[in-house]
Image (spheres, rainbow, N blue to C red):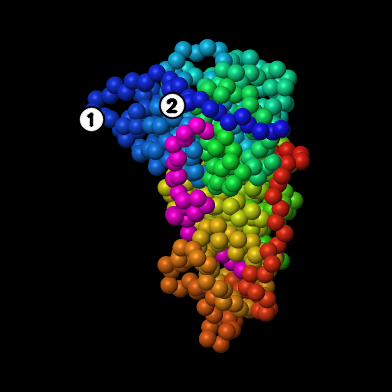
Amino acid sequence: MNQVVPRSTRVEPLPPLSAPSLEPAKVSAFAALGLSAPLLKAVASEGYETPTPVQQRCIPHVLEGRDVLGCAQTGTGKTAAFVLPILQRLAAQPKNGRIRALVLAPTRELAAQISERTWAYGKNLGLTNTVIYGGVGQRGQEEALHRKPDILIATPGRLLDLMEQGYVKLDAVEIFVLDEADRMLDMGFIHDVRRIVREVPVKRQTLFFSATMPPAIAELSSRILINPVRIEVVPQATTAEKIEQTVHHVSKRDKRALLEIVLRAEGVHRALVFTRTKHGANKLVEQLDRANIRAAAIHGNKSQGARERALEGFKNGDIPVLIATDIAARGIDVDGITHVVNYDLPEVPEQYVHRIGRTARAGAGGRAIAFCDEEERGLLADIEKVIRQRIPLAERIALPQGVAPQVERPRPPMPDRRPAQRSSSPERPERGRGSPSGQSPSNVPSVNSASTDARSPHPPRARRRRYRGGSRPTGT
Ligand code: AMP
């Protein structure tokens, strides 16, 4: 049975940690959380001045040894929220040549990102970490494990492989982190996670993060956490407030032309475009290339080297447009993404929240533009239910070749939810308000129009499919 044995004993807190010895005048907001001088120095050298809300609420509890259940979106500063106090707790005890902290992440990008952050935050403490993930040879990872890291950051599949081969022992783990638990579920890794949890000592501290809390994840959390502190940084599945969201109603065949126009618009400096399939991502790169728009694709079929090159180009500004599938995009930590384009709407509505969270990171603003074709109306309705708001209609864009003007049909009010948040821009037409005649107010061929057919405004949803395992998608 793949059941995790519920833990019945309370974690013994590690000895209390001394407060950093800084003069009052120099005490930063990070120091007030109880972080030690070497960590404050590292944080300062990263240019962080103020802890983000998740850091403010998480760090003191982790330092105390409490279990944490964190409902926090990506881009909220969640990594530092758990890595900083973990480093401090580990540094308070002598090294013992064993893995003392284990961080599980669903994708190799996210795992690599956490490892990179852990090195950066821990550079003044002498603690080491190793990252292991699939999709690359395991030899280098075996060698890194021989060097006895204090912290192991891993994707579930490769970790299990290496455990089965005897390269990894988890019996000295004191702190266990499960990051992006809901993605583990979506990607079919939940059984692997349960198997790994069984190998970690019952007496431990556990930190559990998930952007959304579907029932299976809530159930898992209740089994592996003991009396956790609950930290919800933004309400479940609400979209970051600083993101300006819009939707274009556009036919499938016009999406590419619309994308070119959207990407050429002023203010688009770094854009992340989501497609449903790997093939779709590759095709789009070729088409944009023909239109002289530099783009690269990142998805599970690309080699690790190709993915890293694409990411590096995107980070350093050589490649302004990155086309990604959901799984590959997890863990992309690039600041300054000005636009997220949902070229294909996600089939799992919660995914929309993850996607658009790529922009507006760490408090910056950003724009999220969704393309919705006739078949995707049901998906749009699902997304709007999850984010509890109507996505405002984007301004009309004239496409090069004519598209028959169409009419946006009125849509029923949102059922029993918070009031829809509408765009504050007065010239942006509100959804469901056509001209009095019911015709499009302009004859300009527009992509912001919906079919005039007599079906319900939200026709039966397009097929929904969750990834539920089979071959492991990325790097595990
Ligand atoms: P995360 O949610 O952990 O992926 O972090 C998102 C981004 O915010 C990363 O680029 C971090 O480097 C950055 N970040 C984390 N904490 C802070 C902070 N306190 N101040 C400014 N940036 C931060």
Dot in front, 1 or 2: 2
Asked if the residue under mark 2 is in contact with the one under mark 1, i.e. CB atoms within 8 Å, the reply is no
The three-letter code of the residue at mark 1 reads Ala
Q: Note whether ligand 1 is within 8 Å of mark 1.
A: no
Q: Crowding at label 2, few (<14), some or many (≥20) Cα neighbours within 10 Å? A: many
Q: Tell me where residue 100 appears, x and y as whole percent.
A: 54, 20
Does the stretch in magenta take in 236?
yes
Vertical placement of 288 versus 112: above or below?
Answer: below
The quadrant where residue 99 appears: top right
**Residue depicted at x 70% and y 17%:** 166
Residue appearing at x 68%, y 35% in the figure: 191
Q: Residue 255 location, x and y as percent?
A: 66, 64
Magenta segment boundaries in residue numbering:
225-252
Q: Amino acid at mark 2?
A: Gly
Mark number, residue 25: 1
* Location of mark 2 (residue): 65
